[in-house]
Amino acid sequence: MFEEIAEKIKDSKKIVFVTGAGISQESGIPTFRGKDGLWGKYDAMQLATINAFYDNPQLVWEWYNERRNNIFSAKPNLGHKAIAELEKYAEVTVLTQNIDGLHQRAGSSKVLELHGSIIKIKCTVCGFNEEILTEFEEVPPICKCGNILRPDVVWFGELLPQDVWQEAMIHSNQCDIMVIVGTSLVVSPANTLPIYAKQNNAFLIEVNPEETIMSADMDFSVRSSSAVSLPELVSIFKKSK
Ligand code: APR
């Protein structure tokens, strides 16, 4: 799959991955906009906005608990593991839109969670925050200060954590290769990262079984699943060492 760009790949020193729900699809976690995607079954505006949360925190927490349980039983797949293994051959940074923590569980050491994490919760009043790896007895959970706790994820219309975003842009501006895996690139500002990379002469590789709205901007596209194709990317490096 990557043979024709093997020379380009082998020479790269700094690789940035921008990943989306598609890379976790082969771990059994549904995507958002695919044929069985979450936004096909649920109304994103009822579940993934701050107004939805304050209108019906019980419903939002029940949905997130359902997703948490699915994610806790999921395992990193060969795509996640390939990205982690690439750290043996180059400087690798993962900029993920996913909140499932599977890149970290696969062994990736540099992961920026652009949209937060499903295991993190926070209080919007007193600033309390912590990681919770279990299901909640009571839904919605209540903070020690008496206010409702929320998932520490980025909802539609909310800003990304600015420290994370600034760092993500720096990595995008400095990489030799950016591999965009399993994302429809319809949600901003994550979908601007390939533009920053391209402006700094990075080589853009898209890994997605389907075309996206930015496929024309890519230097090379692999129309395959990430769990099948990313191990082949690792073998290109293995052969060169
Ligand atoms: N391997 C690689 N790509 C895949 C696979 C796979 N096995 N299966 C599906 N895909 C691709 C689909 O073709 C699609 O382009 O993954 C992409 C998933 O797109 P979305 O469902 O839109 O997910 P994503 O791009 O991560 O959404 C971005 O939107 O709803 C918000 O906050 C949410 O972080 C999410 C953001």
Image (cartoon, grey):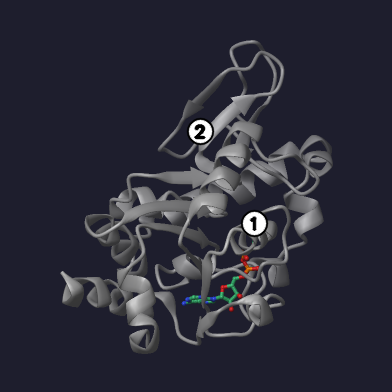
User: Disc 2 on helix, strand or loop?
Assistant: loop
Query: Which residue occupies the foreground of this view, 197 or 41?
Result: 197
Query: Which residue occupies the foreground of this view, 83 or 170?
Result: 170
Q: Do callouts 1 and 2 mark residues in contact (Cβ within 8 Å)?
A: no
User: Disc 1 on helix, strand or loop?
Assistant: helix
Residue pictured at 38% horizontal, 75% vertical: 8
Q: Is residue 219 visible?
A: yes
Image location (x, y in percent) of residue 49: 78, 46
**Label for residue 137?**
2
Above or below 152: residue 157: below
Q: Which residue is mark 1?
A: 196
Residue type (three-letter) at the residue carrying disc 1: Tyr
Query: Which residue occupies the foreground of this view, 192 or 33?
Result: 192
Image location (x, y in percent) of residue 171: 51, 48
Quadrant where the C terminus is found in the figure:
bottom left
Q: Quadrant of residue 40?
A: bottom right
Image location (x, y in percent) of residue 38: 65, 66
Image location (x, y in percent) of residue 46: 79, 52
Q: Quadrant of residue 232?
A: bottom left
Residue type (three-letter) at the residue carrying disc 2: Glu
Residue pictured at 30% horizontal, 57% vertical: 90
Density class for disc 2 (Cα within 10 Å; few <14, some 14-19, many ≥20) is: few
- Along the horizontal axis of the image, is 221 left or right of 230? right
Q: Is residue 181 visible?
A: no
